[in-house]
Amino acid sequence: MSKRFLITTAIDYANGSPHIGHAYEKILTDVIARYKRLSGVPVHFVTGLDEHGQKVQMSAQNKGVQPIEICDSLAVEFQTLCEKLNISNDDYIRTTETRHKNVVQSLLQKLYDEGKIYKADYNGFYSVRQEQFVTEKEKVDGAWPAIYGEVVEITESNYFFKLSEYQDWLIETIKSNESLIYPRFRSADVLNFLKEPLNDLCISRPKERLSWGIELPFDAGFVTYVWFDALVNYITAAGYGTEQFKEYWPADYHVIGKDILSPPHAVYWPIMLKALDIPLPQHYLVHGWWLSSGSKMSKSDGHVVNPLDLIDTFGADAFRYFVISEMNVGQDSDFSEELFQKRYNSHLANDLGNLVSRLLNMGHRFASGIIPKSEIEESEEKTVLKHWESLKAEVFGLYDSFQFHKALEKIFSFIAELNRYTELRAPWKLAKSEESIEQKRLSTTLATMSEGLRLASILLQPVMPEIAEKILNSLGQKSVELFADKLEWGDELAGSEFGEKSILFPKKEH
């Protein structure tokens, strides 16, 4: 049984509609999954919804409905977003599913039986917004940061997981495994957090305060705290407790935002796995935030982007292209609708869309709708071929190192080269000549444009699957399922029919 490439997004929280951050994380993960599949790697891609917790319960109480109704409604919203974005996930996990509840309860019982969970009284501060206990050390200049919202002082009995016992092990693990967290500089954030002694993790909430959660198997008066529920989704979806688990786990990449790296994913999760004697994920891929004029987008500030609006107006692939081309993975990036439309009009409509439109138009006018064979090779064709060979050698290394923005830059520089070549050859002028050499140049020009677009479209498939398929179909080809043997420059298109002229990226004012 060969190991599958398991890649996950963080599961979204059922407390609000999707925004650009949700969309970007899914697109980024999807690009990686599609690239791996095209490289011949068997992939299992998981996303989902985190449905328990106090905020969901409070939202339901405010609306006078049951919490599951809130979750069902938001699950439709998030799954609709995935469908509209052409996200190719293999599984969608909801933490209210029976399969997940069973895994959570079995893990809790195991840890409790081994003495790694204990009951104790707690007196301290609690952040209602973050649904977590906080200490004085979290204060900044004597005040609770805004991220914690309302902080109240409470006293109650709860169950605790012996997190602190594993602190030294975790520090050594992070220091010795330089590839665990990408980009590497994010490791410093985690190690800085670990400079202070860890407190044991409260993993329960009494039912009189929170009833919307997974019941502790060893005490019916309590439910599981959100992180000890939500994080477990990764192994639930990997088939924990079944033979499938060996095929899928450990995860190759958890794709997450920088705000949930530490402590949830890089402190709680690896320690939980260590205590359970389950292998750690191979890597974390940590992305940045989308900003508006240099500030993080926030509903409270009115800085939000509804991805569905842009998708409905410009198409999924245009949106996918923009967020992947604009963000250097791991860094923050600024978003504006003006910049989006500028990229749409210049890179997509003018460069790629216009090239395809011109080729199909000339293919029907000058070649009877049949892709001709290249009949000569002169310096102009050699320049295009040389550019292609250089691109092909570079782009896979860029994809492998998550430098997708640079890979797209290289691909679109090749598309610009095809446009330059077209202008230089001027097939509309060649078509007016009856000379044999000019007719050969005409056939060669249309063949070269076609082959260049075929190859560029294949490389664009992970980012722009729908557009790539349309271009390939217009050249009489099907979508490529594997890169192997499909990226050599050749004449395999000769004799295929050109598709009808179409506008891939209509100019729009938004």
Image: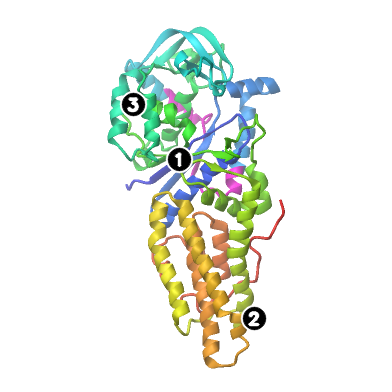
Q: Residue furthest front?
A: 141
Question: Was residue 462 drawn as part of the magenta stretch in this picture?
Answer: no
Cα–Cα span, label 1 and label 3 = 20 Å
Q: How many labels were placed on the picture? A: 3
- Quadrant of the image occupied by residue 193: top left
Amino acid at circle 3 = Leu
Badge 2 is on which residue?
A: 365
Given contact means CB atoms under 8 Å apart, are the residues at marks 2 and 1 in contact?
A: no
Q: Name above or below for residue 391 compared with residue 29.
A: below
Residue 391 drawn at (x, y percent): 42, 64
Q: Assign a secondary structure to mark 1.
A: strand
Given contact means CB atoms under 8 Å apart, are the residues at marks 2 and 3 in contact?
A: no
Amino acid at circle 1 = Thr
| Between discs 2 and 1, the one toward the N terminus | 1
Residue 12 drawn at (x, y percent): 54, 34
Badge 1 is on which residue?
A: 8
Q: Which residues are magenta?
A: 81-105
Q: Assign a secondary structure to mark 3.
A: loop
Q: How is the image coloured?
A: rainbow
Q: Nearer the viewer, mark 1 or mark 3?
A: 1
Residue at x-position 52% and y-position 8%: 154
Using a 10 Å C-alpha cutoff, classify the residue at mark 2 as few (fewer than 14 neighbours), some (14 to 19) or many (20 or more). Answer: few
Q: Nearer the viewer, mark 2 or mark 1?
A: 2
Residue at x-position 63% and y-position 54%: 342
Badge 3 is on which residue?
A: 276
Relative placement, left or right, of 49 versus 246 is: right
Using a 10 Å C-alpha cutoff, classify the residue at mark 3 as few (fewer than 14 neighbours), some (14 to 19) or many (20 or more). Answer: some
Amino acid at circle 2 = Arg
